[in-house]
Image: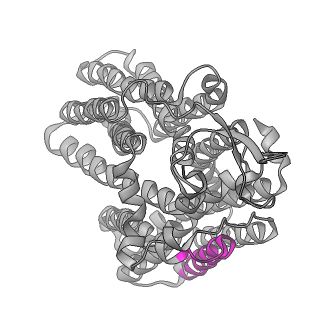
Amino acid sequence: MLSVLRSRAYRHLFAAHVVALVGTGLATVALGLLAYDLAGERAGSVLGTALAIKMTAYVGLAPVISALADRLPRRWVMVGSDAVRAGVAVTLPFVGEVWQVYVLIFLLQAASAAFTPAFQAVIPDILPDERDYTSALSLSRLAYDTESLFSPALAAALLTVTTYNWLFLGTTVGFAASALLVLSAVLPQRAPVPAGRREKGAWKRTTAGVRLFLAVPQLRSLLWMDLAVAAGGALVLVNTVVYVRDHLSLTSGDVALALGAYGGGSMATALLVPKILRRATDRRVMLAGAFALPVVFVGAAVMTAAPTGQWRWPALLAIWAAFGAACSLVLTPSGRILRRCTSPDQRTAAFAAQFSLSHVCWLAAYPLAGWLGAAAGLQAAVFALAAVALSGAALAVRAWPAGVEIHAAREHVHANLPAAHPHLADAVATANGFRHRHAPRADHLHAA
């Protein structure tokens, strides 16, 4: 899996992604402490509003920013996003009002909504080989999970020797380093889009990715699977502290262990996914993960219903690890689906739409897990989220029927493309043109 790091361009972009994630993790911890200083006992409501602003920026702005930035060089979109994020981070220690935090968080997340889809869309061009791209997806999943475990630990270590304001400086350094790494990477040229395929009008460009999701069965299925993942993840991320502290009467340190079990299950599965995908189709692997989630919810319901018993703590750790594993089975291969179902000129819009629509799912699941759990108890939240996960998995099967696979590669020849065209990165020259194999695509490069 680490062989993909031999690609200098991918190695530098992956490093940029990792250091930016670590910086974001440090900012999350520092933001909580800043909110407490500004609002005291109202810090929870401040953070809740900040998270709502974050999700709103992701949901509403990702397609808009993608439409505006799609005509710009991807390198400068990512570098500009890092520059904005670094500027926001270095400003946060100097704010004195809660509303200023809200404004800066909106700017920070708007920049992230531009960076992430651009980063995701360029990787398939850098790694045209299917196995290399699958390895890259596994590394990205590991990066997200490692950040969720590593950043809080790093922040805790730094806070023993300094104040939280210096964590914002660490965040600034991370984003600056990310920008420099992106600048040092040699990125492939974006394939030219024929005039007839260009979306005309701001609204059409903004909604291009969403319309693509609604039109392609595999992408509609991916959206329903994202809903199932959000249901499982929301129970863990929102209610772990309630389970550990109130339901099991354990310590704050055990909260970290429970979240670590979730991350560990996800990381272990991400390491196995490339091997699994050599023996099974994407559809089978991802739907297995989606349908595993309702099964894991059954275990969560049993553990929640038990009033006493020392077995509940190891059971919670195992259930949380199972949630992480099931989510990883869905999330890790998702980039392969987006890559195969879109042409190069559609990818930025498609990844932006997936980024936005998946966060719609999380935006729905978070309050269901939190508010329902607080108002009606944990068992009610478990049942409601289990119903959402089962519905998402069932709708995913219906949207992507058995036998409609996209992994079957076909050999074909391109007679009218220049040798330097990015689409021909893995092609072999023949007397009639350039020959290669990949899954069928309905785009301007493969018109009948």
Residue 265 image point, x, y percent: 54, 29
Q: Quadrant of the N terminus?
A: top right
Indicate whether 448 appears above or below 119.
above
Residue found 76% across the figure and 64% down from its top: 187
Q: Main secondary structure of the magenta part?
A: helix
Indicate whether 123 appears above or below 278.
below
- Quadrant assignment, res 407: top right
Residue found 65% across the figure and 38% down from its top: 134
Question: 310 or 122, which is in the foreground?
Answer: 122
Question: 78 or 341, which is in the foreground?
Answer: 341
Q: How is the image coloured?
A: one colour
Task: Name the outermost residue toward the front.
Answer: 432
Residue found 67% across the figure and 54% down from its top: 123
Question: 257 or 163, which is in the foreground?
Answer: 257
Indicate whether 375 appears above or below 70.
above
Drawn side of residue 423 relative to residue 239, left or right = right
Drawn side of residue 415 relative to residue 391, left or right = right
Residue 396 image point, x, y percent: 34, 34
Give the extent of the magenta segment. 69-91
Residue 213 counted in the magenta span: no
